[in-house]
Amino acid sequence: MSSSGSKLRAKRLAELNAGAKPNGQVTHLETVAFGPSLSVERFGFGNGLELLFCEDHAAPVIAYHTWFRVGSRHEHEGKTGLAHLFEHLMFNEVEGRKAGEFDRKLEEAGAESNASTWLDFTQYNVSIPKDQLPLVVKLESERMSRLVLRDPQVKSEKEVVANERRYRVDDDVEGAVSELLWATAFDKHAYRWPTIGWMKDIEGFTTEDCLAFYKTYYAPNNAVLVVVGDVTEALLLKRLSAAYGELPPSVLPLEDVRPEPPQNGERRVEVTKPTTTEKLAVGYHSPAMGDFDHPALSLLSEVLFGGRASRLHQKLVRELEIATEVRAFVGPFRDPGLFEVFVSAREGQTAEALLAVLDAEFDKIQQEAVTAEEIARASARLELSMLAGLETVDGKASTLGFYETVLGRPGAAFERLEATRRVTASDLVRVARRYLLRANRSVIVVRPDLSASDAEAAQ
Amino acid sequence: MSHAAVVERLADENGATVLLETSRALPLVSISIGLKTGAIFDPAGKEGATRLLSRLMRRTGGGLEAQVIDTRIDSLGASVGADVAQSTMVFQATVISRSLDALVDLLVDVLARPGLATAELERLQRETLAELTDSLDDDRGLARRFFRRRFFGEHPYGRSVTGTSKSVPTVTRSDVEGLFKKNFVRGNLVFAFSGDIDAEGASRIAHRISEALPEGAALTDPTPEPVAVPGRRLVIVDKPERTQTQILIGCMGSHTRDEDHVALLVANTIFGGTFTARMTQEVRSKRGWSYGAYSNVPFDRRRQAFTMWTFPKADDAGPCLRLELDMLRGLRENGVTKHELSWAKRYLVRSHAFAVDTAAKRVGLELDQALYDLPSDYYSRYLERVQAVTLEEANLSLQKRLSDRDLLVAVVGTESLIGGAVRDAIDELASTEVVPFDRVE
């Protein structure tokens, strides 16, 4: 922004703050580059709430996201799944608004809304036609502080979440395997339980549990608003200051983080599932998203598993024809997570055969340099994927909110792209040798059994 | 925003339709090449042939090896895929602008000069069979597959786009070559460009591709209108250890040229088209029975099925199914209310902003209009038509188009746990069929 623009903003903020309550006082904190052509303005409010704003007039719509810095990592043994259950409850009754009214009003306004919970965060996203901004500001600010929790709603929502768990985990082979993999790989860290929670914990939640969680974590100083779209800065700040300026901050508890100790030996679990072919899931402890090694390991994952030209697809699906599908994922989390590999065997093939090929390729990549062509291919895939995610205002807001919540740097998507371009063949050998070790992994083998009960035998 | 106002229709001397919307927001170009072909043109007994063709073209363009093509596409920062449905085939490519010309070279090879190598076809057939085996893990997919098969029967809409374990191995190189020659003619292509590209660039690319193909007119769809089967029928897809039950209920639905098509869309919005619609309220919010509860009025070139979808836990399958059937009957008999109608219109009109908020979406609507033979003003007057729907029209459309007597219920669950309750939930059940889940047809 030019110096005249800065002066104008300062003048506008001074006028706004002159009539605002202390919690609604607004400060411009920084301008952050968001790629070559966009920028994001960061504002802070008196109560600790932060706003990331990206003005975008490409279409007459606005994405309005609220990201809370609370996820399943903040839960405790016996209360797993509370952050996710709470995400559901946030769509219920608010003081002065009966249950269901929140969604009904948003839909009537033409909004698209949803929410998600993961290990490190909970986020609520609403996309609205531009003229509906006042409504969404009102509704979102209301539910941040005036949610009403009653037994019948908690009971009903617990049943909905239990059904979601049956859908995503209990009756889904891959969902069940992923859950087992993380539970096997982690002993101490809260990443060991699933975001949706264990079924017995879901069934056991009380309204008091939910109220305590709300009072602790749902406060302006634990949230960041991300707004992208067809609205001016002045109008937006005026509305936000008025709506959120009433909300007091909370005292956030010290997080009881339990760093995961190094794994010193392979862990292996074998299960039977009502499926037709064997499956293999392998999880290697991997660096946190903010670690210097993360972009290099992500690029290595792309070389090995990204698309049909990748090494493991070529080997397992095309050359040997022993797998139907291979894929991998480097966990994008605040703390060290897992580099997950999932392979589905073809009929008559064994998980052991898949693992042997995987091991041979991993051994190879620890010894031989990846070609420049492979690095360029993998890098281009990551670039395309990132750019394609920025097409809509919602895509931009999701990207900003995710990187802000996990790394504290909303423009980090482009920083990572630059970091990826700097990765060398030597970097790939280094991360392969550091992370893709047998002693550092957990292996889940799924045997098909279309008749037996769900007997599981851990080795 | 009216999408039609910003999408250009470019002249193409080769007879192809070319749509374009330029957007410089990102350094990306999206190219869709659509054809009026799909599983309906699979030769008899060779279900899956059209899908095999599309994938084989993607793997053998210009006579190159599949690995060479895959590597080249990835290295360009591009993606190329082919999506085959009952009546349409769309090649979809996205590329970082700097690599556009190189990608177009490849697209010409894929679309006009595919090698269709026998060895690659055979590999693809083996892959497809393995995918069909893997798909047995997907309960929702199983429900949809059995529903389609039983609902439409021998009608082409009953076919599986992927094919079956019996049909896929029977497809020969001659079959796919025949399909290629029949479908890939100049007049059968619709080009849709969006993103970082102008009219000159789009015309040049469309011209290069269509010029490499033989002349020929767009195919005519020979598919007859499907006919509803009388009575209430049940198919239970029996799968072990299901804690949950996938339930699909369907009857004959809508045609885009019905005079009450939009009225039915509006009425469905009230019934099961949104997160606060009647189905979600009754099934999820009040009873907690299913994580999702929706109804749908899809379209194709011929009449499609109206469907209702829920997935309650096994214990709730019977009561949930009964509730849904009662709701469907109530909907037909009592209709929707004036208040609900006003609400649905506001929702549909305002939320339309998100159907047209990017250049790719706006061009995509025009592409659909061309491929599905939609009325020429289907999208340009869509909002106007929604706003004009009266209460009487909405309720008459429900009575005229939907049926709670002639319907199919497809259920995926453990028969020993849910079979009795599910049967009991359907009054005047005309037929029941129990199929093991791994005997997919």
Image (spheres, helix red, strand yellow):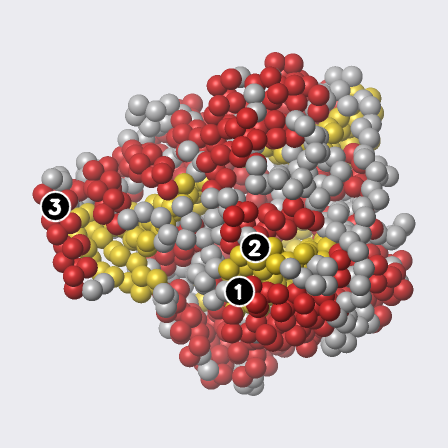
The residue carrying mark 2 is B8
The image shows residue A2 at horizontal and vertical percentages of 20, 64
Residue A360 found in image quarter:
bottom right
Q: On the picture, is B69 further left or further right than A282?
A: right
Label 2 CA crowd tier, 10 Å (few <14, some 14–19, many 20+) = some
Comparing A67 with A317, the one in front is A67
- Tag 2 secondary structure: strand
Q: On the picture, is A176 further left or further right than B405?
A: left
Q: On the picture, is A428 further left or further right than B226?
A: left
Same chain for the residues under marks 3 and 1 in the image = no
Tell me the kind of residue under disc 1.
Asp
Residue A56 found in image quarter:
bottom left
Q: Residue at x 76, y 38 (%)?
A: B302
Q: Nearer the viewer, mark 3 or mark 2?
A: 2
Q: Residue at x 30, y 53 (%)?
A: A53
Does the rendering let one see residue B307? no
The image shows residue A98 at horizontal and vertical percentages of 37, 23
Q: CA distance from mark 3 to mark 1?
A: 45 Å
The image shows residue A369 at horizontal and vertical percentages of 54, 85
Q: On the picture, is B204 further left or further right than A247?
A: right
Does the rendering let one see residue A25? yes
The residue carrying mark 1 is B198
Label 3 CA crowd tier, 10 Å (few <14, some 14–19, many 20+) = few
- Tag 1 secondary structure: loop
Tell me the kind of residue under disc 3.
Glu
Q: Residue at x 45, y 53 (%)?
A: A392
Q: Which mark is residue A15?
A: 3
